Image: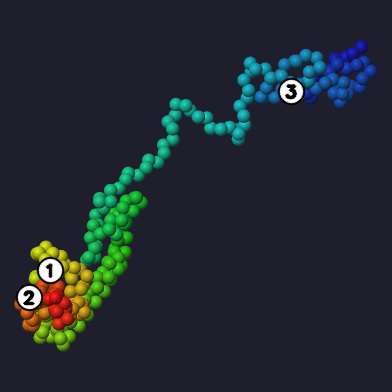
Amino acid sequence: MPETVVDSSTGVVFTKAADAPTTPAAFANTTPAPTTQTPSSTTVDAGPGTTAPVVDPSVPAAPESLLNDKPAVDPAAEPPKTDEPAQAIDPASYKVEGLPDGITIEDPLVKSFLEGAAKGALSNEAVNSVLAEIAPKVAEQLRAPYLAWKTTNDAWQAEVKADPDIGGAKLPQTIATIKKGIERFGGNAEQQAAINKAFNDTGAGNHPAVIKLLHSAFSKLVEGTPVVGSPAEQKITKNAGAALYDHPTSRTTAAA
């Protein structure tokens, strides 16, 4: 007749056959081990022949491991703040100090630098620090062409003053003759001003070859070269164009 035995170490109740040994090992071989459920699911009997556990949907699942958990998002929480874009800087707001002579804040190079500094959000102190380093070098580069042009014109003037035919003591008369020629043949006052401006802007008014050419031409036209020929020829030679071709052959052709 079977005998019921309780294992004192585990508290498990075994049913022992009459002829079976009384050791717990024997009981373990004849009686299945109790079912152990995992904390994350609850199993129910699915019927004969079914071994896979079935999850009871009415029982909530246990939370995942803390190591796998994602931080909970509170829908009511404020979204994280992002860095707001820096306020645009007006290049004209920079207070530039210590620019060298010959360079002003209106200089195109300075204005371009300030525009770039504003885009890079440079402080007023940083702008002046950079300008203190580069402005003198920029000024030197800007002055270089003007200095070279001045040197060239100074050399031309010196050559004219030293010329034996138009310079020295003759220079005042040379300049007076050229001015009279411009007044006589240079058109109205506005046109004469444009001619003089061109002489200044291009440096032609200082070039020895130009001075000699103008003096040579205007000396004959303004001071009045004696004219030989008939009255008809004299009328023709009063024309500026005919006077430029002051040659006997030219006068004869004009008279004909």
Left-right relation of 20 to 187: right
Label 1 crowding class (10 Å Cα cut-off): few <14, some 14-19, many 20+? some
Q: Is residue 221 above or below residue 91?
A: below
- Residue at which label 2 appears: 232
Residue at 31% x, 64% y: name it.
Answer: 134
Residue under label 3, please give it: 36
Q: Can residue 114 be seen?
A: yes
| Residue plotted at (20% across, 80% down) | 208
Q: Nearer the viewer, mark 1 or mark 2?
A: 2
Q: Residue furthest left?
A: 231
Q: Nearer the viewer, mark 2 or mark 3?
A: 2
Whether pointer 2 and pointer 3 mark residues with C-beta atoms closer than 8 Å, the reply is no
Q: In terms of depth relative to the viewer, which is nearer, 239 or 86?
A: 239
**In this view of the protein, can residue 216 be seen by the observer?**
no
Place residue 26 in its image quadrant: top right
Residue 147 occupies which quadrant of the picture?
bottom left
Helix, strand or loop at label 1? It is loop
Q: Amino acid at mark 1?
A: Gly
Q: In the drawing, does residue 119 fall left or right of residue 242?
A: right
Q: Earlier along the polypeptide chain: callout 1 or callout 3?
A: 3
Q: Which residue is mark 1?
A: 186
Q: Residue 168, percent across and down?
A: 13, 85
**Quarter of the picture holding the N terminus:** top right
Contact? badges 1 and 2 (CB < 8 Å): no
- How far apart, in angstroms, are the residues tagged by discs 1 and 2? 26 Å
Q: Position of residue 226 (x, y in %)?
A: 7, 82
| Upstream in sequence: badge 2 or badge 3 | 3
Identity, as a three-letter code, of the amino acid under mark 3: Thr
Residue sitting at x 80%, y 14%: 48
User: SS for tag 2?
Assistant: helix
Going by the numbered disc 2, the residue's amino acid type is Ala
**What distance separates the C-alpha of mark 1 from that of mark 3?**
121 Å
